[in-house]
Image: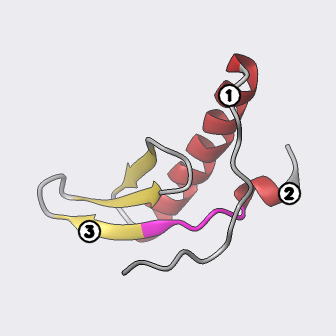
Amino acid sequence: MREGQLRYEVIIYWSAEDAAFIAEVQELPGCAADGATYQGALANVEVIIKEWIETARDEGRPIPEPKGRLLFA
């Protein structure tokens, strides 16, 4: 696993509906995880990022290069 593969922007927020912190990686469609704590959500999404990339590679799907900070309007 290349070092750059964990350089994706992660957005973490509290979800009252889920009663958990949610960590999303918008550059990787469907890549998200939750956790009871902010740190837990981040640790969990790091695992999911690796699994997302491995699955994409196995299925021959393109893997986006990390763009760093995304800007939203």
Circle 1 or circle 3, nearest the eye: 1
Q: Which residues are magenta?
A: 7-11
Task: Give the class, few, some or many, for how many residues have Cα within 10 Å of label 1's Cα (few <14, many ≥20).
Answer: few
Inspect the magenta stretch and tell me whether residue 39 lies in it: no
Q: Residue at x 55, y 55 (%)?
A: 27
Residue type at tag 2? Glu
Task: Give the class, few, some or many, for how many residues have Cα within 10 Å of label 2's Cα (few <14, many ≥20).
Answer: few
Q: Earlier in the sequence, mark 1 or mark 2?
A: 2
How far separated are the C-alphas under marks 1 and 3? 31 Å
Residue that extends furthest to the left in the rendered view of this protein: 17
Which residue is identified by label 2?
3
The relative height of residue 31 versus residue 42 in the rendered view (above or below) is above
Which residue is identified by label 3?
14
Circle 3 or circle 2, nearest the eye: 2
Residue that extends furthest to the right in the rendered view of this protein: 2
Residue 45, x across and y down, in percent: 53, 51
Q: How is the image coloured?
A: secondary structure
Which residue is identified by label 1?
61
The answer to which image quadrant residue 8 occupies is bottom right
